[in-house]
Amino acid sequence: MTYSTILIVEDDTEIADFLSVGLRAEGYDILVEPNGANLLDHVREDAVKLVILDRMLPDAEGADLCRRLRAADSDVLVLMLTARDALQEKLEGFRAGADDYVTKPFAFEELLARVEVLLRRSISTEPLPQALTFADMSIDISRKTAQRAGIDLGLTATEFNLLRYFLENAERVVSRMEILNAVWGYDFDPNTNIVEVYIAYLRKKLESGGGIRLIQNVRGFGYRLSVESDPRD
């Protein structure tokens, strides 16, 4: 899988390092800039897909930078990051062309979920694959069917969407919040245990024929679809 390049424009080195380390751990290519002067050059030359843009920079104001991007016909995604939480400030950011807005302080999982949602929306116009495969599993997206070792799994709609998400992110560690947002929606109660319940349902069907465990727990991080090991729990 090819991961997107994210540009972090943030003068607070502690926040920039925190975001850089976290997003790199999720598989993204990361660029960091403390100032806004080189924003347009990075977007044009480095195939940047998304910009995490601080609202207040030493040399520029984030909303003004966003307006310059849009004036230059750039469709790069912009996630504005700021300590300003007033409604008027948020509206100004959106009117400048920002795609989303996160207020400091923030939880990394929330920011990561917003990044994932924005990037998924950005590829909605690309041709969708009609089938996905991994190991001895396959799903037919148009027919909404799934098989393992040639045997139909008889998945419910939610189980199918969950398996599809794992196939689309094969070998990548995904957090329960990412799964919750992707399969059940961004506004779903984050305190629910529905992710764990449906992973148990899906594992039962995937392993009913004696196959190795493919949906693996990664302690402290989430889950991963992989054939590297079989850590039963």
Image: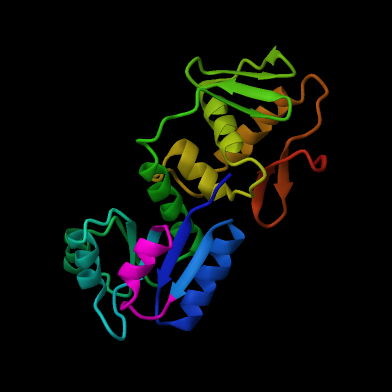
Please report the residue visible at 38 percent of the width from the left and 68 percent of the height from the top. 42
Evaluate whether residue 162 shows in this view. Answer: yes
Q: Is residue 63 magenta?
A: no
Looking at the image, the residue that sits furthest to the front is 45
Q: Quadrant of the C terminus?
A: top right
Q: Which quadrant would residue 40 be assigned to in this image? A: bottom left
Q: Is residue 212 above or below residue 107?
A: above
Apparent side of residue 36 relative to residue 149 in the rendered image (left or right): left
Q: Is residue 48 magenta?
A: yes
From which residue to which does the magenta span run? 33-49
Please report the residue visible at 64 percent of the width from the left and 23 percent of the height from the top. 138
Q: Quadrant of the N terminus?
A: top right
Please report the residue visible at 53 percent of the width from the left and 69 percent of the height from the top. 20
Residue 22, image x, y percentages: 56, 65
Evaluate whether residue 105 shows in this view. Answer: no
Residue 152, image x, y percentages: 66, 13
Q: Is residue 140 above or below residue 14?
A: above
